[in-house]
Amino acid sequence: MRILFLAVLRAHTGNAVTAARIRDHLEAVGHTCNLKDALDFESSTELASLICAEKFEAALALHLYRGGRLLQGQRIPFGIIFGGTDINEDTKHGEKKQTMGAVLEEARFAVAFTESMKEMALNIWPHAKGKIYIQNQGISTMPNITFNWNTFLQSAEINQSADNLHIFILICGLRRVKDPLYLVDVFSEWHQEEPNVYMVIVGPEVDPVFTSEVKNRVKRAAGVQLMGEMPREDLHAIVKNCFAVVNSSVSEGMSAAILEAMDLEVPVLARNIPGNAAIVKHEETGLLFSHPQVGTFFALWILRGGN
């Protein structure tokens, strides 16, 4: 089957990684899957021309609003994969919520990554009962990568020997919903007491205004460093060498960074929100925190070997 797959494909973001992973799964079972950036289309009419020209037989969209709205009225069957933003954020806006409800009514099926995400969707759109299915993301096999840790430390402007250095990595695009500043102050205070402890924020500059705010704040926070986006392979290598992966988002669908850290057997320290709690079992597969000070307490607990 020839499938059109729509997603927002900003480089080195969770959406792009998830979309590529789903495409690979579809192609592995024999389908032809053409992945397109939803932001490249200004209207459903423009998308209809592509569907006709490429003779697509079905379509799939990641995110009910950003991708799904473009599929309304198309002459091929389509399905929807919920993200975090559509359920957690876009439903707060009346027009978007109404559009998403209409898309969901037209879709043949919808996929949620977790039970809690499905429940949230059904609370908003009860008419979708019977067409929402649960499927965990899964992860791709991690490649073996040669990576120079000292080069990374230099790039992060950490002028210390790698010996006895404790790096906590927070991976996210710089936008408010990811709340990368949530732990900045407490980690900076900890660094002043223990100079070998650092938090490094890694990710693309998604929101220019918020990015400027983050940069200004980080400049004043000793022990907190900011790095831009980087290739996925390098990011995996950094995760393998760091002390723990941190997530401080206000909302998540299913964090690819957390899943990949688990696969790499790296400790996970995550903010206690529904999307994170759906995949992190406290004190078994990671640690969940609801306050910055608790977050650094758990980080110290990890550092001390869980004692």
Image: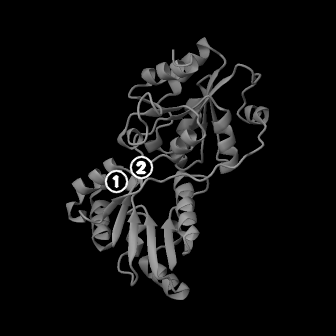
Image height of 92 relative to 23, above or below: above
Residue 97 on image: x %, y %: 29, 60
Looking at the rendered structure, the secondary structure element under dot 1 is helix
Q: Residues within 10 Å of mark 1 (few under 14, many from 20)?
A: many
- Which colouring convention does the figure follow? one colour
Q: Nearer the viewer, residue 217 or 235?
A: 235
Q: CA distance from mark 2 to mark 1?
A: 8 Å
Residue 214 on image: x %, y %: 55, 36
- The disc labelled 1 sits on which kind of residue? Ile
- The disc labelled 2 sits on which kind of residue? Gly
What number is the disc on residue 214?
none
Number of dots carrying numbers? 2
Looking at the rendered structure, the secondary structure element under dot 2 is loop
State which mark lies toward you, 2 or 1: 2
Q: Nearer the viewer, residue 178 or 286?
A: 286
| Residue displayed at 46% across by 25% down | 295
Which residue in the structure is indicated by mark 1? 87
Which residue in the structure is indicated by mark 2? 253
| Residue displayed at 53% across by 68% down | 26
The answer to whether one can see residue 44 in this image is yes
In the rendered structure, the answer to whether residue 104 lies left or right of residue 147 reads: left
In the rendered structure, the answer to whether residue 37 lies left or right of residue 197 reads: left
Q: Residues within 10 Å of mark 2 (few under 14, many from 20)?
A: many
Q: Are marks 2 and 1 in contact (CB under 8 Å)?
A: yes
Q: Earlier in the sequence, mark 2 or mark 1?
A: 1
Image height of 192 relative to 117, above or below: above
